[in-house]
Image (cartoon, grey):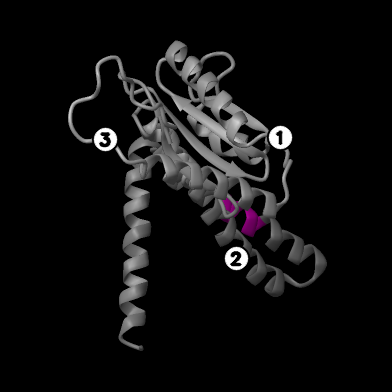
Amino acid sequence: MASKEPSEKSGRLKQIRLAYQQTKKADPWVGLIVAAWGLGVFAVLLAIGFWWGHPIYLGIFGALVGLLAAAFIFGRRAEKSVLGQMEGQPGAALAVMQSLKRGWVVTPTVAITRNQDVVHRAVGRPGIILVGEGQTGRVTRLLADEKKRMSRLAANTTVHTIIVGNDEGQVPLLKLQRHIMKLTPTMAKPEVAQVNDRLRAVGDLMKNMPVPKGPMPKGARMPRGPRG
């Protein structure tokens, strides 16, 4: 066990160093900003300690809080840098959705067009969230069709539609997670599980439907199953 601890610490330090190097490429001032926050918090608490007559206690406390503040600021700027580099790339919205906290079930690519416009789905206490990325006109139609389908499969469940982008009425990639997390809860946790089970059952049923072998009869059409 003792031999693993140094290697684990060196691995974490290597990850932090790599994250810092990647962030610095897009955010050259990240080091100075993080240091300023950490030292600023320490200096304020140390000054309070001198004024209060307990500089040592407040100095130690200030150092700890300063480190936490620096780590928090670095994490936020690193996240912003990563999302900034992903913006406009296929699958960027899905990556953000998959970083949602507990209580969410994310299903990728529940609908797609020939031009690779896609809709991803997340289910949580606010209801069903459909997130589209691609060309606005095509994605709008795709979202409308998928919303109708969700309303049939999960009646009385709130369905939200979001288009990721920087145009009016769209949600920028950098604000997507925050936007979803701010949605008002409309379901209890057991209801979320029920909706997920229903959607999963329908999806599994359509995937396992037997397909007739041989040529299709003239004029026959394949059953139109769900896209997810």
Task: Name the residue tied to disc 3.
Answer: 212
Neighbor class of circle 2 (other Cα within 10 Å; few <14, some 14-19, many 20+) is: some
Dot 2 or dot 1: first in sequence order is: 2
Residue 172 percent across, percent down from the top left: 52, 26
Residue at point 54%, 40% (across, down): 122
Dot 3 or dot 1: first in sequence order is: 1
Task: Name the residue tied to disc 2.
Answer: 63
Residue at point 49%, 50% (across, down): 75
Q: What span is in magenta?
A: 37-43
Quadrant where the C terminus sits is top left
Residue at point 53%, 42% (across, down): 199
Task: Name the residue tied to disc 1.
Answer: 156
Residue 227 — which label?
A: none
For badge 2, the amino acid type reads Ala
Q: Is residue 133 visible?
A: yes
Give yes or no for contact between labels 2 and 1 (Cβ–Cβ under 8 Å). Answer: no
Q: Is residue 29 visible?
A: no
Please, what secondary structure does the residue beneath circle 2 have?
helix
Quadrant where the N terminus sits is bottom left
